[in-house]
Image (tube, rainbow, N blue to C red):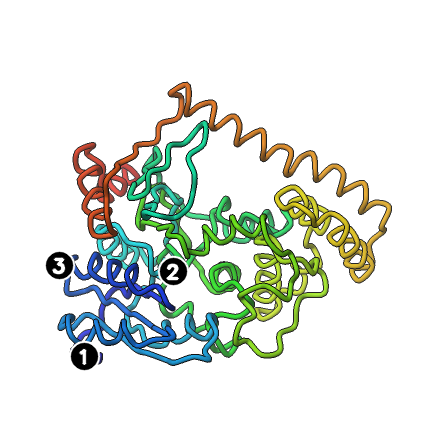
Amino acid sequence: MERNMEALPLLSIMIATRNRIPYAISAIQSILEIPDPRLELVVQDNSDSRDLESYVHKNIKDHRFRYRYNPPPFSSIDNFNAAVELATGEYLCLIGDDDGVNPEIIEAATWAKANDIDALTSRIICGYLWRNTGISSTLFTKVEGGQLSIMEFSGKIFEVDVRREVTNLIRNGGVYYLTFHLPKLYHGLVRRNCLNDIHKKVGAYFGGLSPDIFAVLAISEAANKVVFIDYPLTIPGACKVSSSVAEGQIKKHSKRLEDAPQFRDRGEYHWCELVPRVYCPETIWVDSAVAALRAMGRDDLVQALNLPKLAAYCIGANRGVRWPVLRDLFMGLRIMRKNPAIGAIQFAWSFLSGPGMLLVRRAWNRFKIICGMKFIHIIYGLDNMVEATHALTCHLKENEHSFSDCVRHRIK
């Protein structure tokens, strides 16, 4: 669906979708409810059926909406690249087809433009759990489905030292990138010019197997001014077929690299020789991170990758991978010409200071939730992303939170 407008939009929200039509429809409805002409919604679809296309043509007449269908075979990376190609906004934000956005994201893009910000990134503060995900309640968390969880946030805004954050990520073995203050296209705002610079250098906007972490590392090299805000700009969703739920299931199923769904329709793919040939979230992240660094000419950072810590996190988070990961760890150390004996000592220490401390921090966070030291507000009974978006907006207003207040407090 094309449109004819004199002025390009300020912000393009992009969704690359495949075979998740009910969720995608809800995401579309929730975003198009935002009454702002500066917004553009882009949906790039490569589903097996054309049901979403049929829905779009019958029900959506909004000139801010752009849709394109590419039939299979079409890889997930190709789909994400096509979404960026279709978008025309000055700032871009990529979300999943089961996700949503805080309507204030338009105000955030306006502020970013006025302050010459290349990337505005935020902490994942809230999340919507769709019904029937198959996730069970635990001793610490009640799971009903159809619920929006909102964590405490400070509203702080500060400029990020991106080079330092990337270095810290590499020292951490390249894993858990969301814990660092790095620029994100997936659930973040990025100026289109940065992505154009990446495309000129790489020949594509995304590479590797994980588009979100590939973009994180590539944008870190392309962006000049990156700002972090501790305020919810988007609403990550989790449905029964979402990647967040699927990654949780990886621990229960095959760890064979050949079984990774990310290889679907990719043809021949060169897996990084430094990364253990095991299928788990950690290895997929790091392979894509290395692909981005090499594409952007940062082989020096690849050489600094902490392989012992990567191995420690892989083994700590996934069952049945100990021996293949250790085997490939020492193979990687030989490729990097590092002493295997020192590497073994580093692995032992990394296991204690990495996964070991991660378990301690998680237990401490759960203890704080039980004791009321850490507050998570949960809203139940929400059937779709439209209702989840309304619930977030109401919660922020009732508690006198707003993006503009964050900006005013920063100026003071």
Q: Where is residue 267 in the image (x, y as percent from the top left)?
A: 58, 79
In the displayed structure, would residue 87 be above or below residue 302? below
Disc ID at residue 35: 3
Per the image, label 1 sits on a secondary structure element best described as loop
Mark 1 vs 3: CB contact within 8 A: no
Left or right: residue 69 versus residue 259 is left
Residue at (20% x, 48% y) in the render? 387
Of labels 1 and 3, earlier in sequence is: 1
Question: Which tag is nearer the camera, tag 1 or tag 2?
Answer: 1
Per the image, label 2 sits on a secondary structure element best described as loop
Q: Distance between the residues labelled 1 and 3?
A: 17 Å
Q: Badge 3: how crowded within 10 Å, few (<14), some, or many (20+)? A: few
* Quadrant into which the C terminus falls: top left
Q: Where is residue 200 in the image (x, y as percent from the top left)?
A: 48, 78
Q: Where is residue 169 in the image (x, y as percent from the top left)?
A: 58, 49
Disc ID at residue 118: 2
